[in-house]
Image (cartoon, grey):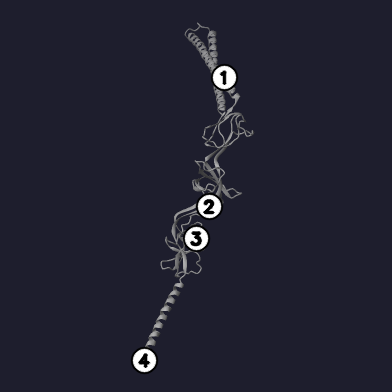
């Protein structure tokens, strides 16, 4: 009987131990199943970023100014001082022309001026003589008139009338002499203008640079006959072609949709693929009219080129900034759900539960979107697939590598 009781107690202990072990195993299984039911979601933090929306346009560099330098007088090239690639300053001598008849024209103009000056001197002397004669005749007439009044009958009326006639004739001669002097003085001015014209034409035999630039083409050599480039009806040959390359133009075809975002003075970044460099530029002017055939507006960007690194004809890409937001609260584009009129964001709160919030979006780039309301800095938003998530659901957030990157804004 004693042995039976001991065996029964031992069996009961073994059963209790087995039951306790089974219960602990079942608890672990339930706990494992509970963790397995919490889905892991990829999240990103709402953060402050500098956002910008840009459009990339391609254009070709053109000189700021380019002109074929013409001669203003016809002649032979006596000396040409520049060649292709030479840098010149404004006013620098480029070439000298030889015009043999120019010296004769100058001598003729000088002689005409001297003759006019002599005419002025002669007219002045004639005026002085006429004035002297008028003074004598006028004095005689005045005296006779006075005597006739004081002593009537002493002087005959005929004598007084003759004196008055001579006085009037002398006065008319003075007026004529004055007119001759004025005409002679006007002729002097005409001769001076003619001499100035000939001297100006003579100065045109020295061809100078109209602005700072680079000689890009040479048309004439020493001894070449050059016609005066003053008429569109003649095929006058230029001397050289001069380009201003220290400042270049980029004429951008701005699409109609972004025309309202273009402003004079706007700074842009100019990338030159052939040089693998970027240069600063500025919107200097635009046409204020959309071309009907291309639906674009020509917009000019000025690019400084003091070292002449850039060459006209090179292609460049311009990043034209349309909108910019500094330190704007933003989230990845893939974190925005809902519709365009009612955007949503799935937020993981501090309890690791899903909240569905209505947000107001703003500027959008290729990777980020501005959030104007509905989120705060540091909020965790779900990115990627959200089809199986519901509000209040417990989740396990995991910040992805994509969310941790600092994206290239505006690209």
Is the residue under label 3 in contact with that under label 2 (CB below 8 Å)?
Answer: no
Residue occupied by mark 4: 3
Mark 4 vs mark 1, CA separation in Å: 163 Å
Mark 4 vs mark 3, CA separation in Å: 79 Å
Residue occupied by mark 1: 111
Q: Is 379 left, or right, of 183 in this rendering?
A: left
- Work out whether mark 4 precedes mark 3 in sequence or the reverse, and give the earlier one: 4
Question: What is the x, y in percent for residue 154?
Answer: 50, 5
Mark 1 vs mark 3, CA separation in Å: 88 Å
Q: Nearest the camera: 164 or 357?
A: 357
Q: Nearer the viewer, mark 4 or mark 1?
A: 4
- Work out whether mark 1 precedes mark 3 in sequence or the reverse, and give the earlier one: 1
Residue occupied by mark 2: 55
Residue 130 against residue 313 in the figure, above or below: above
Residue occupied by mark 3: 333
- Crowd around label 4: few <14 · some 14–19 · many ≥20 (10 Å): few
Mark 2 vs mark 3, CA separation in Å: 19 Å
- Work out whether mark 4 precedes mark 1 in sequence or the reverse, and give the earlier one: 4
Is the residue under label 4 in contact with that under label 2 (CB below 8 Å)?
Answer: no
Question: What is the x, y in percent for residue 331?
Answer: 46, 60
Mark 2 vs mark 1, CA separation in Å: 70 Å
Quarter holding the N terminus?
A: bottom left
Residue 196 against residue 359 in the figure, above or below: above
Q: Nearer the viewer, mark 4 or mark 3?
A: 4
Mark 2 vs mark 4, CA separation in Å: 96 Å
């Amino acid at each position: 009987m004693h042995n039976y009781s001991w065996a029964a107690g031992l069996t009961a202990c073994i059963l209790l131990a087995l039951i306790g072990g089974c219960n602990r195993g079942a608890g672990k299984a339930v706990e494992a199943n509970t963790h397995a039911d919490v889905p892991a979601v990829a999240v990103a933090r709402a953060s402050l970023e500098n956002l910008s929306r840009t459009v990339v346009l391609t254009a070709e560099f053109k000189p700021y100014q380019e002109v074929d330098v013409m001669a203003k007088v016809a002649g032979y090239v006596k000396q040409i001082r520049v060649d292709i690639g030479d840098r010149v300053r404004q006013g620098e001598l480029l070439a000298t022309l030889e015009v043999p008849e120019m010296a004769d024209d100058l001598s003729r103009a000088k002689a005409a001026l001297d003759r006019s000056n002599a005419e002025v001197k002669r007219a002045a002397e004639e005026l002085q003589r006429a004035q002297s004669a008028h003074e004598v005749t006028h004095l005689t007439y005045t005296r006779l008139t006075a005597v006739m009044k004081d002593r009537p009958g002493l002087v005959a009326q005929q004598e007084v009338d003759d004196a008055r006639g001579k006085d009037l004739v002398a006065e008319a001669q003075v007026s004529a002499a004055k007119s001759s002097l004025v005409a002679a003085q006007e002729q002097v001015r005409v001769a001076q203008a003619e001499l100035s014209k000939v001297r100006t034409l003579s100065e045109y035999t020295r061809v100078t640079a109209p602005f700072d630039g680079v000689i890009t083409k040479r048309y004439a050599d020493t001894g070449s006959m050059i016609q005066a480039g003053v008429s569109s009806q003649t095929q006058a040959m230029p001397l050289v072609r001069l380009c201003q390359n220290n400042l270049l133009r980029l004429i951008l075809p701005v699409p109609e949709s972004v025309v309202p975002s273009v402003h004079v003075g706007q700074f842009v970044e100019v990338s030159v693929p052939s040089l693998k460099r970027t240069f600063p530029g500025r919107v200097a002017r635009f046409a204020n009219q959309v071309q009907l055939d291309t639906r674009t507006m020509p917009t000019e960007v000025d690019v400084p080129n003091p070292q002449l690194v850039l060459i006209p004809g090179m292609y460049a890409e311009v990043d034209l900034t349309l909108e910019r937001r500094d330190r704007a609260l933003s989230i990845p584009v893939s974190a925005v759900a809902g519709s365009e009129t009612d955007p949503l964001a799935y937020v993981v709160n501090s309890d690791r539960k899903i909240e569905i919030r209505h947000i107001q979006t703003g500027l959008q780039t290729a990777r980020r979107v501005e959030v104007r309301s509905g989120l705060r800095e540091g909020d965790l938003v779900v990115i990627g697939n959200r089809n199986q998530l519901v509000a209040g659901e417990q989740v396990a957030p995991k910040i992805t590598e994509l969310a941790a990157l600092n994206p290239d804004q505006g690209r």
